[in-house]
Image (spheres, grey):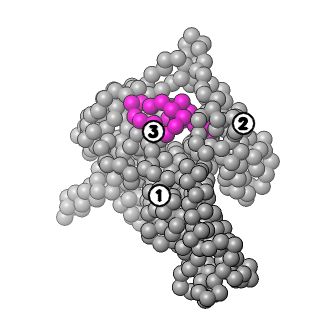
Amino acid sequence: MRGALNGALMDSAGGQAAAGLSPRPLPVQRLAREWAERAREGYLSRDAARGQLLAQLRAAGQNEDRLAYAVIAFDHFVRAAEELASDADFGKRKPADEWNAMGPGSSGTSDPLSHRGLLTIKEANVWNLEASAAGVALQVFGDFWFEGELCVLFADTNVGKTIAAVQILDGVTRGEDVMGFTVGIAAQPGLYIDCELSSRQFYSRCVNDCGTVYQFQPGFLRCEIDPDLDFDESGWDRAIYDGIEAAVIEHSVKVVIVDNLTYLREETERSRGALPLMRQLKALKARHGLSILVLAHTPKRDPSRPLSRNDLAGSRVLLQLADSAFAIGESYRDPGLRYLKQIKVRQADFTIDAGNVAMLSLERGDGLLTFGFAGYGSEAEHLKERSIGEENELDAQIVALRKRQPQMSLRQMAAELGTNHRRVSRAIHREEKCRQ
């Protein structure tokens, strides 16, 4: 379904070379198994096979953590073979089907990578060795989004999600910091799945009043959904994800931005719509070692309240499956200001929170519409202040809605009126107290 995605996509090999990407690490587990099998077949002693395995890995420049993992994997395979043969005849050839059968179904020791249905099972030490060999996750965008994460960026309509996302990917392709926040990964190609803007609308954000058009790096790959593609609506989800996966493989990208979540899946404001979507993205991330940023919108909300996880459409499921999340808020003090706030963090501390949001200002320099860093401040300074009249009006709306729809829960009422369930509860209790 590659036809579902259009765009000026670069040649994969050229993109990797231009970005200065390092080669993939060797498949340690597979090599350990091959050398263990040579020892089992009697071509080498156990110690000699282990030594040859380590020599091969050292020659390829593998670090000490990966060497340690190789020894553990090798010894696992050797012990598994010993269960099929006594120590006396170890080294004599055993039927290949017995060797291949060892693993999840065998008793005692098992393959260091075992599968039982949806589960991948390894010893805790093996997990830690693999994580150690992979190194510390680098920042893709400051402490908001790290390498290997499925991250969610959400905001209200017309606040600047797309502006920020395009700017972030531009920084990734250049290896340059963005909005004053660190881009720690090496410069590399990235894929922008644009379901929000037409090509003309995208262009309008890349040209200034003097007609200067912003020049992206060749590795900035933008895709659109082909509106003329003819396929069965029931296969929509499969077509979209097959297309994304095909583009990732063909162009060797590791950074993907999806703009936006609502277009790709109906009913993302409900858990039943969000759950399969996030599972597919998480599986895609794990399968190809991706860093994925998905953009989402907020349903109607009360602008006098601080941004929270409850403001994300389908929040409960989306944030459970996301590794991290951050939001963009709009300042009511200054219409030109926006602010960034961490919502969920796993690999850093909560430092950009309600008391210390990162303020941003809209800028257009050499063509591209971007955000510039404007300092830090308190989120409370940028929230809308309710007048007494507005508070009374909201109380009246809550009471009226309660009378019309008594079966609605407090949270449903809050979502309908753009406030929070505690505010709804207070208004209802006040009204009931007045009637007594």
Report the span colored magenta: 168-191
Q: Which residue is mark 1?
A: 65
Q: Position of residue 28 (x, y in %)?
A: 58, 61
Q: Which residue is mark 2?
A: 11
Residue 184's disc is: 3
Q: Earlier in the sequence, mark 2 or mark 3?
A: 2
The verdict on residue 378 being magenta is no
The verdict on residue 181 being magenta is yes
Q: Amino acid at mark 2?
A: Asp
Q: Amino acid at mark 3?
A: Gly
Q: Secondary structure at mark 2?
A: loop
Q: Between 49 and 123, which is closer to the camera in this rendering?
A: 49
Identify which residue is drawn at 47% across, 72% down: 123
Identify which residue is drawn at 29% across, 53% down: 423
Q: Secondary structure at mark 3?
A: loop
Q: Amino acid at mark 1?
A: Asp
The answer to whether 278 is drawn above or below residue 393 in the figure is below
Identify which residue is drawn at 36% across, 60% down: 410
| Viewer can see residue 280 | no
Q: Are marks 3 and 1 in contact (CB under 8 Å)?
A: no
